[in-house]
Structure formats: C-alpha cells, structure tokens
Image (tube, rainbow, N blue to C red):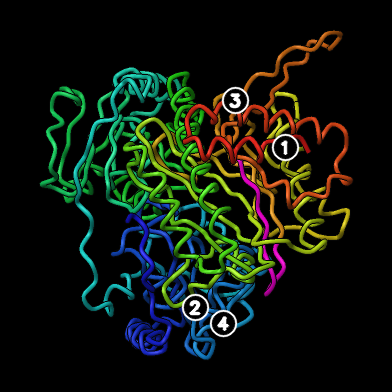
C-alpha cells in the first residue's frame, strides 16, 4: 500500500530531545530557536530527513512551527490542527499556541528581554517571513540570529536526503514543451530587466522542465534548485547519481548538475536576479547580496502559468476525475453493503479505497494520506489513522473520508461524509448547511478580477446563520500530476490572488464538533469563462466547472432546508454523476449508483 498506518513520531522522546536542543542553544548563547515544518524548498510535504518539527515535538501536521525558549517551548498550529497537536505532543514540555491568532513576534516579545537572541536556520525560512518577524520585534530589543541548524546537530541517525528516479512528463499530459515554457518565462525576465531567476519550489521546477519524481511521498517531484537564465537556459542542481536518462528530453539548453555546485554558481550570476520573497530561503538572497549581486524581489515566474492549466492539462484532469470517481463509487457500493455489519474500522476503509483506485491500473500514488475519521476522529480535520488510533465504525457515527489519487493525467482530491446507519437531526442539519455552502460556490458567477477571499464567505454563510464556522480555507489550488496543494490560487480569507481560467481548486466547506463528529464535502472545480446570459451586460464573468462526480449522500440531507435552486443544482449534479460514471462501473455499482443519484 501507498499509505502506512504506523505511528511516525514519538511524543515520549520530546522532552529529552528538547533538552538536547536547549543545550545547543546555550552553547551558541541563544535564548530561543525556531524549528519550522518547512524544508529548504518550502514544500507542504517534506522528506523524512526534513521532518524536524515532528522529530522534536511529536506533532505531524503539515503546517506549524516550534519556538523553543530556555523555559518554554510553543508549538504554533492553525485551526486545522488544534485537536491533533494536543494528542501528539508532551504537554508538560510543549505548549500548543493558537496561530495565526497569536503571532510569534508578540509572543517572543512578551517572554524575552532586550538583548535576547533567537536563532533560526536561514535555509528554512523565507526572506519575507524573517522580514515580517524582524518588524514585529523591532521595538522589543529581541534579535533574530542566523545560525546552524541546531536540531540537525542533535538528531542521531537522521535519514538521508532522497535521490529517486527522474521521469519525463510526456507532451500528451503536459500539453506544452519545456522549451516553449522556458522561452516564455525568459521573455518575462528580459522585459523586467532581470538576468536570471532562482527557482526553489520543487513543483515549479517539475512543471517547467516536464519532469516528475518520487522524492516526496505522494507528491511526484524532484528536489533541487534551478537557475533560469534570460536566454531560456536552465541549470538544474539536484542530488547526483539519479537513475534515468534525460539527455534527449532536456536537450542542450537544460543541464542536470550536482546540488553541491549550486552555491558557487549562484554567486557567479550577473544581476539583477529575481527571487521570490515568499518562497525562497533567506540564505539565497543573503548570499547574492554578500557577493554584490543585485536582487529583484518578484514572484516565482512559474507559479501563475503552472496554476492556469492548459487545455491538455484540463482534459487530463477531467479524465482523471472520472476514473477516480468510478473507483470511489465502487468503494461506496462496498461500503453500503458492509458498514451495517459493525465490523469495519477506519483502516479497513483506507485499505479498500486504495484497492479500488489501484484496480484501474493507472494509479501512480495516492495524492495524500487518506483521512478516514469516524465519530470524534472526524472532528480532527487532518486526521491520520494509525494502528493505535484505529477506531471501529459505530452505529450513528459520521465518517469523514477525504482522499485522492495521483495519475499521469491529473491529481484528484475528493471528500464525502458517510453515515453509519441512521444519524440524528443535529448531524443532518449541520450536513445540509455544509452542502448549501458547497453548492453556493459551485453555482456562483463572478466578475473577472475577484480573488478567493471574495468568494470564501459564500461557503460559510449557511453556517454563519447558525453561529457556526470552520477553521480552514474553503479551497486550495491543485496541480496537474503534481502537488495536491498548489498556489497561488485559493478560496480562503487569505486568498488574495485573482482567480483566472484554468485554475483548479477544491471546494470543501466543513463543520467540526469537538469530541463528537466532523462533516466535510469536497469537489474539485476549475475556473472557466462563464457563458453569456441573454439580456446580460458585457461584463466579463467567470464560473466554476465541477470535476468530481460522486454522489453526495442524500440520507444526510434535510430536503426542506434546501432552496429550489439548491435542489435543482443537486439533482442536476446527480444526473450528471449517473451519466458520466454509470458506464465506467460494475453492474452492482451501477445499481447502487442509480439509487444514490435519485432526485432529492
């Protein structure tokens, strides 16, 4: 299986490891040290050798950081992980901190006096991040100090960096040759008067060069750094001795070079050099500035074109989701025939769902570790089942099942909430409000130029009417056989980038009642140009195309809460599910699907 059920961190070792870190802090005359989740490429998912936060604290979430002081260690996590962190860290050694409500600057200023020194590894923090923290500490007298990575000093038997095979993403899936991509980005550099750009994001490099890899679990990328020159040449620095012959694919204008030569090449560049303040390690800009090379702050040139999928990538996404939808429907057929027996566990669900995806013969990997949370585990937004946490399904439970697959033609992500037998009115009412929010996003038409933050309230409004909300974004960007979490597009309070045609996002409102149940409904959607309306103005409008086709469980809906428009959308959606998925599934699944897609 792609998914493991082993416990990946040991909270019991946290106090001793924290003590070892503090000994190194004392040796360096530091009163604090910051341990981020991030690696040098700022990816959300990291290799085993970069799981410093989990190694130190026991917390395995995909976002957060620890600030270790001499007498306190705060673990900063956002709303997705507040239940999880309390179950994973030693609360005698580590204090969970609600972030971003509590910011690290004021937190440090409240605890440290003037002249205190807080260390950080400049390879693991972006220039923008440190700039913001320095500004917050400006009046406190607390100094941020670049330092060696003190966690690495005390981490015995740290895993080796990954160095897997590099594979080619063929034109039939990529839709555009890497030579064309390089030429287009080079023209942008020339127009901006920049001689080169430093690429640090693994998915940007994979997209630009039409390559994929296996360096990070579930994310098909190759780790390394790249220099994009203003004539379109690219030098890609990565771990040496990787299997795979890429000479014919790359041609003479792309060089594959050992990663240990990157630093020297960087300081030999002619400026100005573009660096993305939001994603590149601070160490890079400081190296350039020390060498007297001008730095131009600007967005990673790959981010926006990567986000706006071309026609081939969009068609691949549609096909991947139909294939994936058929697998999920086969799973749901099995689930409905089996769940009533009272013998299933969360691990059983994960195992069966992955088996159904594998049956297509085209699954490259899962796109993230499946979230299968039943009852109170469903209220843990990014719950990962282990053999220790594995819970049996009990009658009256809700099951949050969030999963996805990686295929050559696309990356999928879908969530459905399932009942275990009849559930109460409280759960059905909450489910219906979540569904109303999801439908609102699905149906919306909006003027070009709006960002995700402008649409985010639509998904929350039905919950707000009941004085409820959810502590995560409504939607994240999704790559094309790349990362299941892709920027810059997102539907959230912080989504500031205008949405553009070709962007793929998730649409996943939820509701979580601590210790009781969770609800989430998710489809992926693509931004498209809205069809003109008779009698409408000439305003350029956008809309969303739904990509996921799997029934939404009607047993959890209170139909009387739905408006006429909401009912019409749901019935039309289910009719489309039946038409698109019915021909792709077994006879038994087809019979199940016909019942599941009946009108509300």
Query: What element does badge 2 sit on?
Result: helix
- Residue 203 placed where, x, y %? 38, 40
The residue at which mark 4 appears reads as 95
Query: What element does badge 1 sit on?
Result: helix
Q: Earlier in the sequence, mark 3 or mark 1?
A: 1
- Nearest to viewer (mark 2 / mark 3): 3
The residue at which mark 3 appears reads as 579
State the quadrant of the N terminus. bottom left
Q: Earlier in the sequence, mark 1 or mark 4?
A: 4
Q: Are marks 3 and 1 in contact (CB under 8 Å)?
A: no
> Which region is colored magenta?
512-523
- Nearest to viewer (mark 3 / mark 1): 3
Residue 277 seen by the camera: no
* Residue 195 falls within the magenta-colored stretch: no
The residue at which mark 2 appears reads as 88
Work out how far the residue at label 3 is from the one at label 4, CA to CA, in angstroms: 52 Å
* Residue 519 falls within the magenta-colored stretch: yes
Q: Earlier in the sequence, mark 2 or mark 3?
A: 2
Work out how far the residue at label 1 is from the one at label 4, CA to CA, in angstroms: 37 Å
Q: Residue at x 57, y 60 (%)?
A: 339
Compared with 169, 476 (above or below) is below
Compared with 197, 461 (above or below) is below
């Amino acid at each position: 299986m792609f998914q493991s059920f082993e416990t990946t961190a040991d909270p019991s070792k946290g106090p001793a490891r924290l003590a070892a870190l503090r000994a190194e802090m004392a040796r360096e005359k530091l009163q604090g040290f910051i341990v981020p989740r991030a690696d040098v490429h700022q990816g959300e998912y990291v290799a085993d050798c970069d799981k410093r936060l989990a190694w130190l604290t026991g917390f395995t979430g995909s976002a957060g950081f620890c600030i270790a002081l001499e007498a306190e260690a705060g673990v900063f996590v956002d709303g997705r992980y507040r239940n999880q962190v309390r179950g994973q860290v030693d609360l005698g050694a580590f204090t969970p901190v609600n972030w971003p409500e509590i910011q690290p600057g004021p937190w440090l200023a409240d605890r440290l006096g003037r002249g205190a020194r807080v260390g950080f590894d400049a390879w693991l923090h972006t220039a923008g991040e440190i700039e913001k923290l320095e500004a917050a500490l400006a009046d406190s007298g607390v100094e941020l100090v670049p330092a060696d990575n003190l966690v690495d000093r005390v981490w015995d038997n740290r895993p080796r960096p990954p160095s897997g095979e590099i594979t080619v993403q063929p034109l039939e899936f990529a839709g555009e040759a890497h030579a064309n991509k390089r030429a287009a980005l080079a023209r942008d550099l020339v127009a901006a008067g920049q001689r080169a750009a430093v690429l640090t994001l693994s998915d940007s490099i994979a997209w630009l060069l039409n390559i994929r890899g296996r360096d990070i679990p579930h994310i098909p990328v190759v780790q390394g750094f790249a220099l994009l020159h203003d004539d379109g040449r690219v030098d890609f620095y990565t771990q040496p001795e990787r299997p795979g012959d890429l000479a014919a694919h790359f041609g003479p204008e792309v060089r594959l070079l050992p990663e240990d030569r990157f630093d020297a090449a960087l300081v030999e560049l002619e400026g100005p050099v573009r660096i993305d303040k939001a994603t590149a390690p601070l160490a890079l800009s400081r190296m350039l500035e020390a060498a007297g090379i001008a730095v131009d702050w600007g967005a990673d040139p790959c981010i926006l074109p990567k986000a706006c999928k071309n026609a081939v990538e969009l068609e691949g996404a549609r096909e991947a989701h139909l294939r994936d939808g058929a697998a999920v429907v086969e799973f749901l057929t099995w689930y409905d025939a089996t769940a009533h027996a009272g013998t299933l566990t969360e691990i059983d669900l994960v195992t069966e769902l992955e088996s159904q995806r594998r049956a297509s013969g085209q699954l490259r990997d899962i796109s993230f570790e499946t979230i299968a949370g039943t009852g109170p585990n469903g209220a843990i937004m990014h719950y990962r089942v282990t053999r220790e946490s594995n819970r049996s399904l009990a009658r009256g439970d809700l099951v949050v099942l969030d999963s996805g697959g990686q295929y050559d033609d696309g990356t999928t992500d879908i969530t459905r909430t399932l009942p275990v037998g009849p559930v109460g009115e409280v759960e059905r009412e909450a489910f219906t409000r979540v569904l109303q929010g999801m439908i609102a996003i699905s149906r919306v038409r909006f003027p070009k130029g709006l960002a995700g933050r402008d649409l985010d309230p639509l998904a929350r409004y039905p919950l707000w009417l009941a004085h409820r909300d959810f502590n995560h974004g409504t939607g994240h960007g999704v790559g094309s056989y790349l990362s299941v979490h892709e920027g810059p597009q997102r539907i959230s309070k912080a989504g500031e980038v205008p949405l553009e045609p070709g962007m793929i996002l998730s649409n996943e409102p939820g509701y979580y009642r601590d210790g009781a149940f969770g609800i989430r409904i998710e489809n992926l959607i693509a931004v498209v140009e809205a069809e003109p309306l008779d009698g409408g103005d000439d305003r350029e409008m956008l809309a969303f195309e739904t990509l996921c086709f799997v029934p939404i469980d009607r047993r959890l809906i209170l139909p009387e809460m739905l408006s006429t428009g909401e009912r019409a959308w749901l019935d039309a959606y289910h009719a489309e599910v039946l038409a698109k998925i019915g021909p792709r599934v077994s006879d038994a699944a087809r019979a199940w699907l016909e019942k599941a897609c009946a009108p509300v």
